Image (spheres, rainbow, N blue to C red):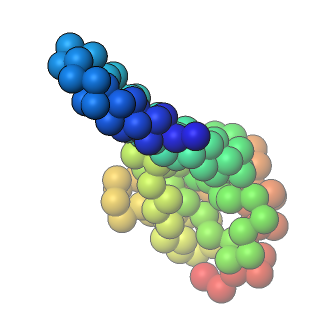
Amino acid sequence: MDAIKLLKDVVTVAQKSNDIDMVQKVIAAQEEVIELQDKVFKLQKENNMLQEKLKRSSKIVRYRGIPLITIEDDKCKIIYCANCYGKEEKLIPVHITDDIYTYCGTCGDRSNIKYSPDYEIIKETLKDVSI
């Protein structure tokens, strides 16, 4: 049975007994239950958001020596700015020029993919992408 409904029933019984003190205490308990239900709802919402964040974070692929990331199993093979993701968890695609230079239009970071020890992996990631 729902706690709020149960407390409403108790209020009704208390009102019939004309015990004002009991009615006030039951109403106070009802308000507490409503507050607790609201807190539980907010915590469930926050928990869901954190689980989504953790799930998304586990799919991030990082590259050594260069602030670039990709998302595991991303069919579009987009390369994102690791600086923007690290600061605000925003996935900002970088601009790629000459197959080796990247530029983030949001934070202004410029990188050369060849400086990464993972250069060949990055190039493999980009092989099907038209630049």
Q: Residue at x 45, y 55 (%)?
A: 90
Q: Position of residue 97 (x, y in %)?
A: 53, 74
- Of 113 and 106, nearer the camera is 106
Q: Quadrant of residue 105?
A: bottom left
Q: In this rendering, would 108 be left or right of 130?
A: left
Q: Residue at x 62, y 43 (%)?
A: 51
- Of 33 and 45, nearer the camera is 33
Split into 4 quadrants, where in the image is the C terminus?
bottom right
- Of 106 and 24, nearer the camera is 24
Q: In this rendering, would 72 be left or right of 107?
A: right
Q: In this rendering, would 37 be left or right of 124?
A: left
Regarding residue 3, the answer to whether it shows in the image is: yes
Q: Vertical placement of 56 versus 12: above or below?
A: below
Q: Position of residue 32 (x, y in %)?
A: 33, 25
Q: Position of residue 95 (x, y in %)?
A: 49, 71
Split into 4 quadrants, where in the image is the N terminus?
top right
Q: Residue furthest left?
A: 20
Q: Residue at x 71, y 44 (%)?
A: 58
Q: Vertical placement of 97 versus 9: above or below?
A: below
